C-alpha cells in the first residue's frame, strides 16, 4: 500500500456531482433513527461511541442492513418471524470486558418487537459455552420495540471476550415481525427454532438453518484496552462481503486483516460493511442502497473509526448487462463512477476519516467480461492509482491478477467464477495492506 498525499480534511457541506443523485448529509450516530427505539420503560436507546455513563464503545463486528429480498433462493427475510428464536454466530475482531448489540429495523414497515435477547460465547454450531449466557436489556427492560426505520442498541452487559472469539447472539421474536431487515450474504450459518430458546445452552432446538443475518447489525465492546480512534471499516460489494470464501471459516479479507492485527499483538476494530451486489451510484432492488447514500448510515455511524478502505464499483460497471440478478441498473460511465468515489471521499474527510482506495479486481472470463466493461475498469483503476485523491491506494487488482494475463485473476486466487477471490485470494489481499499505515 502506498500513500499518495497527506490526509485532507474539510468541514464544508457535501454535494454530489450533477450526474448523481443528491447525497444525504454526512451521517452521525443518530442518523439511522436510533432515537426512536424504546424498551417497555420508555428509555431511549443509546447510539454512538459513548454512552451516558461514560462507557466508550468500539466495533467488534458489523454488517450492513438490507431490505428483504430473495434473489438467489428462499430465505427468512420476506416471511419474517413469529414465535421464533433466531441464533446468530459472529466473530469479533477485538475483545473487551463489556458488550452490547445493535439491532436494525431500517427496512421494516412496522415496529419490530424484540421479546428478549441474550449474548454468549460460542461453543459449536448452535450451542454456547456453559456459564457464558448473558441476558440483554434495553433501557433496563428485557424487551424492546424498534420503530420502522430505526436502529437500537442494547444496554451494555459485563462480558469478557477475546479478539477473534466467536459470539452467539440470540433473539426471541414472539410477535409477528413482518418482512425482516437482514444482511443477505453472511458466509455463516444462522439458526432458527420454534418458541423461546434464547437461554438454551445446547442447540438441539434449532432445527432450521440459514446463511443470512437478521436484524443484528453490530456487536460493540468496551474495556480491555485504551480507547483510541483507530477503528477500520472496509466498505464495498461482494468482494468485501466475502463471496467465494468458505462458509463459517471467517476468511473474508477483512477477517484476514483482523487476524494480522491480532497476530501482531495489536487487535483492532475491523468492521465489514460490504454488501454483495452493491453499487456506488445506483440503488439495486436486491443489493442495497447505493454506496453514496448508505456510507453515512453504515460507516460514519460506527464508533471511533479512523480509516475506511473503499473497494467498490465493479457492479456499477457490470450491473447494466443482461442476465444479472434482479433488474439491470442504468449504465454508469467511468466518469460517473469516479464522481461517486469522490463523493465517498468527501463524506469521510468531513468526519476526519482517512480513506484508502482499492483498485477494482480482474473480471476476465466472468459474466461481467466485455470490452466496454474492461475499458471502464481500467479507467477507474488508473484514476485511483494516479489522481492522488485518495489518501492511500492499495492495488488489489495487481495483487490478485495473473502476471501472464493481468486482466484475469490468478487461478490460485480464483473462487471459480473469475470474479470473486477464494480464501487464498482474500489472504493475499489482506497481506497487501500495510499495518503501519493505519
Image (spheres, helix red, strand yellow):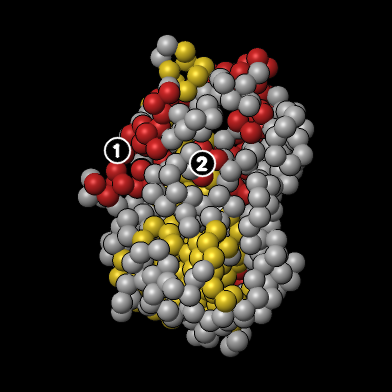
Number of labels in the image equals 2
Q: Position of residue 109 (x, y in %)?
A: 75, 67
Which is more toward the observer, 163 or 68? 68
Residue 243, labelled with which disc? 2
Tell me the residue at 51%/41% (across/down): 243
Question: Which quadrant of the figure contains the C terminus?
Answer: top left
Left or right of 19, for residue 360 = left
SS for tag 1? helix
SS for tag 2? loop
Indicate which label's residue lies in the foreground, 1 or 2. Answer: 2
Q: Position of residue 82 (x, y in %)?
A: 65, 75
88 w.r.t. 139: above or below: above
Which is more toward the observer, 328 or 354? 328
Question: Which quadrant of the figure contains the N terminus?
Answer: top left
Left or right of 75, for residue 306 = left
Q: Earlier in the sequence, mark 1 or mark 2?
A: 2
Q: Which residue is mark 1?
A: 436
Amino acid at each position: 500500500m502506498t500513500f499518495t498525499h497527506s490526509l485532507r480534511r474539510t468541514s464544508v457541506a457535501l454535494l454530489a456531482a450533477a450526474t448523481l443523485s443528491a447525497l444525504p448529509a454526512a451521517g452521525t450516530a443518530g442518523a439511522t433513527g436510533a432515537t426512536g427505539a424504546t424498551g417497555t420503560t420508555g428509555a431511549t436507546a443509546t447510539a454512538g461511541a459513548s454512552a451516558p455513563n461514560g462507557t466508550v464503545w468500539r466495533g467488534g463486528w458489523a454488517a450492513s442492513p438490507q431490505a428483504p429480498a430473495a434473489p438467489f433462493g428462499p430465505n427468512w427475510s420476506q416471511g419474517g418471524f413469529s414465535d421464533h428464536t433466531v441464533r446468530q454466530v459472529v466473530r469479533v475482531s477485538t475483545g473487551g470486558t463489556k458488550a452490547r448489540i445493535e439491532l436494525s429495523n431500517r427496512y421494516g414497515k412496522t415496529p419490530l418487537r424484540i421479546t428478549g435477547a441474550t449474548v454468549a460465547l460460542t461453543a459449536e454450531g448452535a450451542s454456547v459455552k456453559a456459564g457464558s449466557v448473558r441476558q440483554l436489556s434495553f433501557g433496563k427492560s428485557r424487551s424492546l420495540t424498534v420503530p420502522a426505520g430505526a436502529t437500537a442498541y442494547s444496554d451494555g452487559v459485563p462480558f469478557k471476550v477475546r479478539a477473534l472469539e466467536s459470539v452467539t447472539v440470540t433473539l426471541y421474536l414472539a410477535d409477528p415481525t413482518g418482512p425482516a431487515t437482514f444482511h443477505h450474504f453472511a458466509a455463516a450459518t444462522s439458526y432458527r427454532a420454534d418458541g423461546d430458546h434464547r437461554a438454551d445452552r445446547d442447540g438441539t432446538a434449532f432445527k432450521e438453518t440459514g446463511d443470512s443475518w437478521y436484524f443484528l447489525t453490530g456487536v460493540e465492546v468496551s474495556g480491555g484496552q485504551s480507547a483510541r480512534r483507530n477503528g477500520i471499516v472496509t466498505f464495498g460489494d461482494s468482494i468485501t462481503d466475502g463471496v467465494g470464501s468458505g462458509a463459517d471459516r471467517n476468511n473474508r479479507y477483512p477477517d484476514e486483516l483482523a487476524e494480522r492485527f491480532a497476530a501482531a499483538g495489536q487487535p483492532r476494530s475491523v468492521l465489514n460493511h460490504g454488501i454483495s451486489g452493491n453499487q456506488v451510484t445506483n440503488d439495486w432492488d436486491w443489493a442495497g442502497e447505493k454506496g453514496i447514500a448508505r456510507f453515512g448510515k453504515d460507516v460514519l455511524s460506527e464508533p471511533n473509526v479512523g480509516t475506511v478502505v473503499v473497494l467498490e464499483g465493479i457492479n456499477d460497471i457490470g450491473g447494466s448487462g443482461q442476465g444479472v440478478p434482479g433488474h439491470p441498473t442504468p449504465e454508469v460511465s467511468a466518469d460517473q463512477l469516479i464522481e461517486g468515489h469522490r463523493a465517498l471521499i468527501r463524506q469521510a474527510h468531513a468526519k476526519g476519516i482517512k480513506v484508502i482506495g482499492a483498485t477494482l479486481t480482474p473480471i476476465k472470463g466472468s459474466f461481467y467480461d466485455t470490452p466496454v466493461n474492461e475499458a471502464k475498469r481500467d479507467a477507474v483503476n488508473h484514476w485511483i492509482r494516479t489522481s492522488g485523491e485518495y489518501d492511500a491506494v492499495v492495488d488489489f487488482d495487481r495483487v490478485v491478477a495473473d502476471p501472464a494475463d493481468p486482466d484475469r485473476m490468478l487461478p490460485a486466487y480464483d473462487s471459480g467464477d473469475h470474479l470473486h477471490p477464494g480464501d487464498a485470494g482474500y489472504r493475499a489481499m489482506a497481506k497487501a495492506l500495510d499495518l503501519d499505515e493505519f
